[in-house]
Image: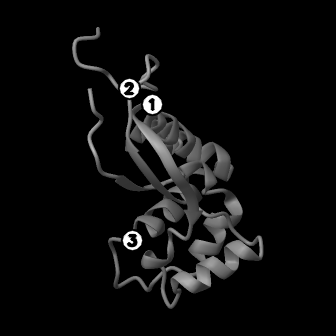
Amino acid sequence: MRAAAGVVLIVEWARERFDEKTARWCFARLPGPERDHSWLRHRQAEWQQSGRSWDAYLRSWAEAEGMQAGQDILDMLDARFDSQSVAYGPYFFPDLADTSEADELAAIGSGLIQAARIKYAGRPGRPRLDTGGFRREGVG
């Protein structure tokens, strides 16, 4: 049997890299209140209202939303595809005021924040027995 040709490209978020330093950097660059649908502004307000540490707040938010950690996503992809490349990079800049991809990349490079974008490329491969959380057809 011949494997299907092609490449899958996935861009995802490594939520576990959204540490307090990264969050504070983002919050300092939020757009004005006229942009009321800012997910980052909502995270900031919810965190402040919670009275919890950033780590505790992030963990509870991720659990409530059923978010997977970036590494878990990569493990699931690797169960289905032959990984060709994985890279981390800027993620937040589209939601920040006066902040370019280059600005975020510079902050990552200087250690101010963590790179939270996962860019994955893989080729269709033979599914492994451990599907990494994916449910295979015909398997209970």
Say which residue appears at 60% left-offset and 85% top-offset. Answer: 103
Residue annotated with mark 3: 38
Q: Is residue 29 left or right of residue 131?
A: right
Label 3 sits on what residue type?
Answer: Ser
* Image quadrant containing the N terminus: top left
Q: Quadrant of the C terminus?
A: top left
**x, y (%) of residue 88?**
58, 61
Mark in the foreground, 1 or 3: 1
Q: Which element carries disc 2, helix, strand or loop?
A: loop
- 25 relative to 140, above or below: below
Residue 89 is left or right of residue 121, and the answer is right
In the orientation shown, which residue stands out farthest toward the top? 140
Q: How is the image coloured?
A: one colour
Query: Which circle marks residue 67 in the picture?
Result: none
Instruction: From the image, tell me which residue sits under label 2.
Output: 127
Mark 1–mark 3 contact, CB under 8 Å? no
85 vs 21, nearest the viewer: 85
Tell me the distance, in whole angstroms, between the alpha carbons under discs 2 and 3.
Answer: 39 Å
Location of residue 49 (image quadrant)? bottom right
Q: Position of residue 30 (x, y in %)?
A: 50, 79
